[in-house]
Image (spheres, rainbow, N blue to C red):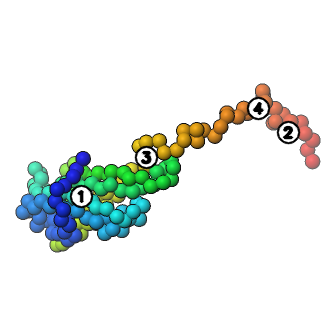
Amino acid sequence: MFKTTSHKALPRQADPRKFAQQGVSLEGFILTSELPRIVEATESNEGEIQVKLEFKLSEEGKRVVVGHAHADMVLICQRCLEPVTVPVESDISLGIVWDEEAAAKLPPHFEPWIAGEGMADLYDMIEEELLLSLPAVAYHEEPCIDSKLYSSGKPVEVKREKNPFQVLEQLKSSPKS
């Protein structure tokens, strides 16, 4: 599990191309309340996202950012419909590109980050990566509802006719009007 010892805010704006050329590493946190799509997708706007990013040139000579983001997020348990805190981890491996054409030329182990020219919003990039890492469904690890509630009770016997075509036979023999 990723935990950072740095307790400083991650800068919101950065020039990713310049950072990659210079080999800049960043480590810090983002307040969950600063990521509106995360706030909308979760049940709490409190907490922090711990982030570690390394901007560099890849072996292929591409400008990239690699790193990790971690947050404990409050979601709704799909069993009991109560809040549950779930650790959300995101491994970041992005190629910094200008456009779709450059994105198509990235090695397959990098996802494209079309950062535009100059300064880019790191919070938007982190938010996107965390949204992609949210679990499809969230559950408490421990049993949160009585196991008897998983069943609707005693099995119900369904009486079926021996011949499924008997109804059709009745319809066929009925007089036409």
The residue nearer to you, when weighing 20 against 38, is 38
Tell me how far mark 2 sits from mark 4, CA to CA: 20 Å
Residue type at mark 4 is Lys
Disc number for residue 87: none
Return the residue at label 1: 50
Q: Earlier in the sequence, mark 2 or mark 4?
A: 4
Tell me how far mark 1 sits from mark 4, CA to CA: 59 Å
Residue type at mark 3 is His
Q: Residue at x 43, y 49 (%)?
A: 138
Q: Quadrant of residue 18?
A: bottom left
**In this view, the mark in front (1 or 2):** 1
Return the residue at label 3: 140
Tell me how far mark 3 sits from mark 2, CA to CA: 53 Å
**Disc 3 element:** loop
Residue type at mark 1 is Gln
**In this view, the mark in front (3 or 1):** 3
Q: Quadrant of residue 42?
A: bottom left
**In this view, the mark in front (3 or 2):** 3
Return the residue at label 2: 171
The residue nearer to you, when weighing 114 against 36, is 36
**Disc 4 element:** loop
